[in-house]
Amino acid sequence: MRGQVQGVGFRPFVWQLARRAGLAGQVRNDGSGVRIDIWGSESALDDLLGQLQQEPPPLARIEAVEWTPLNTPTPKGAFEIAPSGSGRVSTEIAPDAATCASCLAEIFDPHDRRYGYPFTNCTHCGPRLSIVERIPYDRAATSMRAFEMCKACRREYEDPADRRFHAQPNACPACGPRLWLEDKSGEIACEDPLAEAARALRGGAILAIKGIGGFHLACDATNADTVAELRRRKHRVAKPLAMMAGSVAQIRRFCHVSEEETRHLTSSAAPIVLLENRDGAALACIAPGQSRTGVMLPYSPLHHLLMDAVGGPLVMTSGNPPGAPQVTCNAAARAELAGIADAWLVHDRAIVNRLDDSVLRVDLGAPYILRRGRGLAPEPLKLAEPFSGAPPTLALGAELKSTFCLLKDGHAIPSQHIGDLKTAETYADFRAKIALFRELFRFDPAVIAVDRHPDYLSSIWGRALAQETGARLIAVQHHHAHMASCLAEHRIAPGQGQAVGIILDGTGFGTDGTVWGGEILLGGHAGFKRKAHLPQVALPGAEQAIKEPWRNSVAHMSAALGPDWQRHLDGTGLRSRLAKKPVSFIAQLIDKNVNSPLSSSTGRLFDAVAGALDLAFDGQHYEGQAAMELEAIAAAHSARAGSYPVDICAGGVLSFAPLWRALLGDLRAGVDRGVIAARFHNGLAAILAQAARDIAAEAGADCVVLSGGVMQNRLLLEALHGQLGACGLDVLVHRRVPANDGGISLGQAAVAALA
């Protein structure tokens, strides 16, 4: 049995099925997965195989079953679990898993010895990647080595019939980690830290809570004043916060929840799921300007017990100072969160690997990953067959939303979300995690892939690693990597025909030395041609233009409408707002090409339109704020608003002159901003779909890939998927890795492995 079958309770599961059926033989781990030597009647063996494949243990994932007849006598004695086979045993590490139903029942059962114990776990749930330090994966190689199992826990650990058989984090109140509550002066003397923490939260306090993959900052989500104070202390003016609710029923008081969304909320990954608000006013302080809120359910016994004691939803946002990664150790939490938290709910089990919460949304009836972290990483992705013979490849990703990816034996192993490498702490974490993964997966790269941007810190580190290891270095163009990422996760094989890629994002280093960001490509893993793109428009002030949408409004209107663009502003309200800005200075920067690089960025186009509609006009408090608010106001009108015209000029360059004339005309006419935003979305989707159809028809391609960070815009994604699918094209969207730069390392690995 191949796949995720080691360290997930697979051997005892086989043992129980075989003994129940009276079969003889043995089961053991080996270098390829789990090997079962078994004797019995044909029908009994068929039944056992069917049960294994249809109802495996909760954390198991079977990828392949290979069998061959054994021409040896039936062994005497009962079926047994044998020691691991000789040779290299698989080193696959399972993701951390949310509390299972059996453990949940125990912590709320007054008669159980684990009643109220916040570190209860078994083979089917609990920490995995977050506690592992090295291989092989056993207790001595995790942060649980500090806790010696008591006799009762040891009996469970050694009994194949027990669901805690070889559960490395197994513990109980007598022998396991301890929880306590402290304030700025030290530990608070109390019998029940969880109950005391709940009282503090209900009273308006802000707590730092140590979870599985890092600290969270928590407060009462229904107390607008406390939420505002958390924002003030954390300098998080407008960025949406995540919320934890005690149950799906509690979530339904605030948000609409579909059956598919419920399935993901209650899965072993227990991610944050973006849900449509039921009552926008009730959640206005949590996700201002948004129509959706990120919500999760408790995923550890500690969270279950705390939420039960609090009784209502909590804000549960990353515990970190502004710009820094989530803190993981007690000392750092005390020091770095001192100006934010009123108290700390901490424990003495060390977090070895920081894991941010995974984030997803249900789009087009299936999960759409926005951040791959706790619960999802480091689950491998099986690739198309040609990759099975590729050399071991390490891809270093981009610079924002950083991840890296290992490719070996036909599988890709993307890391968890690491963050933006521009901070020293995150860059150090990035390098440390690469070293850890190389150890965990016994990985020596023959090829190292980096982004073509020469100044990305990931590219710099990749060049250093290539020199150190002697690996071949390959630079992969940013948007090609986006396209290849989606092809790879869908197991599209190299040479399986050309695909059209609509790749929309904020920034990517182009092959011509300019900044790309709105591209339609034709190609596959082996290469691509740029067939169409958004116009190259100046970024006045470079990085500053990304922070201040009004700069992009000026740049895009002047590029589309010409030198007399300001005459179109009469009656729109834009003239008076721009009168307070140094527009003439910006015009000079653009005219003289001073600190104003050209870019075909779709992200900056969204900023320009948002600025024109007075959304985040002066500045963005977080990445993507203007575009997200533009999407939010458009959502209610998209189906019936109509669309703005966009032209395609020579060379496949889009022209937005007709769009801007129509948009400014609607502003003069007093058309609702939501309708204007919807017409923009619809017009952009229509022209991109038309261009992709034409390119596909000319090339004989039948597949279109939708990738890049802007494809996280739900309205645009669904419009493109519907229009392209309606004309018979196979439309691929991301399902296993993010469409944003968090998925780019997978594409780099796929391109470089076969180069």
Image: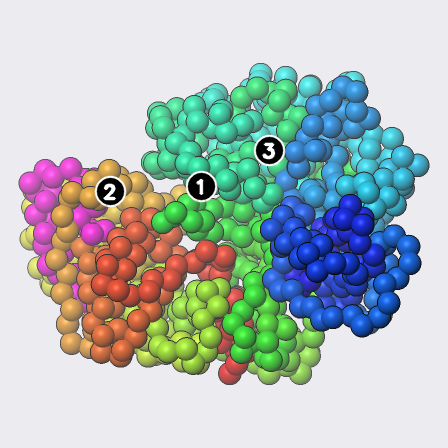
What's the magenta region? 654-682
Which of 388/542 is in front? 388
Residue kind at label 3, given as amino acid type: Pro
Q: CA distance from mark 2 to mark 1?
A: 24 Å
Q: Position of residue 670 (x, y in %)?
A: 10, 38
Q: Which residue is mark 2?
A: 634
- Helix, strand or loop status at disc 2: helix
Q: Is residue 725 left or right of residue 143?
A: left
Front label number (2 vs 1): 1
Image-quadrant location for residue 20: top right
Name the residue: 63% across, 17% down.
199
Q: Relative to 144, does residue 104 appear above or below in the rendering?
A: above
Residue 452 appears in the rendering: no
Name the residue: 75% across, 34% down.
120
Residue 441 is a magenta residue:
no
Q: Which residue is mark 3?
A: 298
Indicate which disc, 1 or 3, sits on the residue closer to the N terminus.
Answer: 1
Q: Position of residue 257 (x, y in %)?
A: 42, 33
Q: Is residue 526 left or right of residue 564?
A: right
